[in-house]
Image (spheres, grey):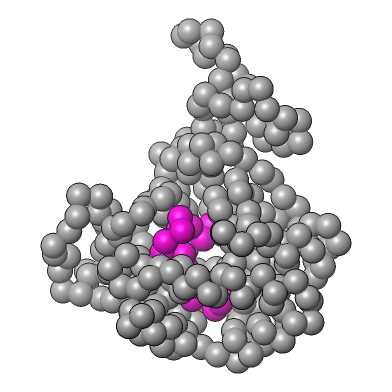
């Protein structure tokens, strides 16, 4: 059942050196506060998974936390490249980064297979493309019933899934709404899960038609971190900080500038800075 912990306690209890870690959230509810605590605790040799790695993964990679990245698109949305990711892949700085690239559809199916406890995902895809030539984990199989050729990739079953959500109740159930990507399946597929939330409430009401509720038995640790998705947005709480995404391009281009920024804004700060960002964006 869910435990309510501080962010430092939750990361210490759920994420270990060498783990396979999925931090998910699609443009929305991206768990930045949790990612910063992973950096502060100096986790190493992580195999990171994310459909759309953006700024928080650029930071984790640039701080030497990751050995491998499995993804389906990587970049600074609306701005350009992830410069720390590129430096790690192209130049091995600060450590070499292995990459495994898939399509969005493949990764969504792989998460769903992992959540179902299946060894692989089978789907129609990778037809007429070159990605299978550089990714040995993309296979083709024949349907035993129709003879159709289908794509297959290993299920995604992380050691730990990390997500951000709007609410948790006092029983440890988690509530999400708005754009919901693969967060539910990532949590169900993982051995452990860490969920940061905007607030802890007595009950979930009212709720929209696309709301997702993760029952307490699926969640290892819950942390109340107002603003914990910043600079991404949290539907119903605050908007996306577009200026932050634009500024990151210049910050991340230079190694020394990046390290100086991380020291000032991550290593020497705690999760309380996210509440201030939420207040600023909510007032905008």
What residue appears at the point 43 percent right and 49 percent down from the top-left corner? 182
Q: Quadrant of the N terminus?
A: bottom left
Hey, which residue is sitting farthest top in the picture? 146
Q: Considering depth in this image, is 29 or 8 the residue closer to the camera?
A: 29
What residue appears at the point 61 percent right and 49 percent down from the top-left corner? 73
Q: Considering depth in this image, is 82 or 42 the residue closer to the camera?
A: 82
Q: Position of residue 84 (x, y in %)?
A: 73, 67
Instruction: Name above or below for residue 132 compared with residue 66.
Output: above
Q: Considering depth in this image, is 70 or 56 the residue closer to the camera?
A: 56
Instruction: Give the quadrant of residue 16.
Output: bottom right
| Relative side of 266 to 217, left or right | right
Q: Which residues are magenta?
A: 22-38
Instruction: Name above or below for residue 20 compared with residue 257.
Output: above
Is residue 280 in view? yes
| Relative side of 255 to 205, left or right | right
Tell me if residue 23 is in the magenta stretch.
yes
What residue appears at the point 68 percent right and 27 percent down from the top-left corner? 129
What residue appears at the point 27 percent right and 53 percent down from the top-left corner? 212
Instruction: Give the quadrant of residue 117.
Output: top left
Q: Position of residue 17 (x, y in %)?
A: 65, 68
| Relative side of 104 to 136, left or right | left
Tell me if residue 279 is in the magenta stretch.
no
Q: Position of residue 276 (x, y in %)?
A: 41, 88
Instruction: Name above or below for residue 222 compared with residue 173.
Output: below
């Amino acid at each position: 059942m869910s435990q309510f912990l501080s962010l430092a306690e939750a990361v210490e209890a759920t994420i270990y050196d060498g783990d396979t870690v999925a931090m998910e959230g699609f443009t929305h509810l991206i768990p930045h506060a949790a990612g910063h605590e992973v950096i502060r605790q100096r986790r190493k040799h992580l195999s990171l998974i994310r459909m759309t790695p953006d700024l928080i993964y650029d930071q984790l990679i640039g701080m030497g936390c990751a050995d491998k990245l499995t993804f389906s698109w990587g970049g600074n949305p609306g701005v350009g490249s992830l410069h720390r990711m590129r430096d790690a892949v192209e130049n091995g700085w600060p450590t070499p980064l292995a990459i495994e690239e898939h399509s969005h559809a493949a990764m969504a199916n792989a998460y769903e297979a992992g959540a179902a406890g299946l060894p692989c995902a089978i789907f129609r895809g990778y037809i007429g493309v070159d990605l299978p030539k550089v990714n040995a984990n993309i296979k083709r199989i024949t349907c035993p019933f129709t003879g159709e050729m289908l794509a297959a990739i290993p299920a995604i079953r992380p050691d730990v899934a990390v997500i951000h959500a709007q609410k948790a109740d006092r029983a440890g159930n988690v509530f999400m709404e708005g754009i919901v990507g693969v967060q539910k399946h990532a949590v169900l597929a993982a051995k452990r899960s860490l969920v940061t939330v905007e607030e802890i409430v007595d009950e979930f009401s009212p709720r929209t038609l696309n709301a997702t509720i993760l029952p307490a038995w699926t969640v290892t640790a819950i942390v109340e971190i107002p603003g914990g998705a910043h600079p991404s947005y949290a539907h119903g709480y605050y908007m996306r900080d577009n200026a932050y995404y634009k500024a990151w391009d210049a910050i991340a281009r230079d190694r020394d500038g990046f390290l100086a920024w991380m020291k000032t804004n991550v290593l020497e700060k705690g999760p309380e800075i996210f509440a201030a960002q939420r207040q600023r964006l909510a007032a905008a």
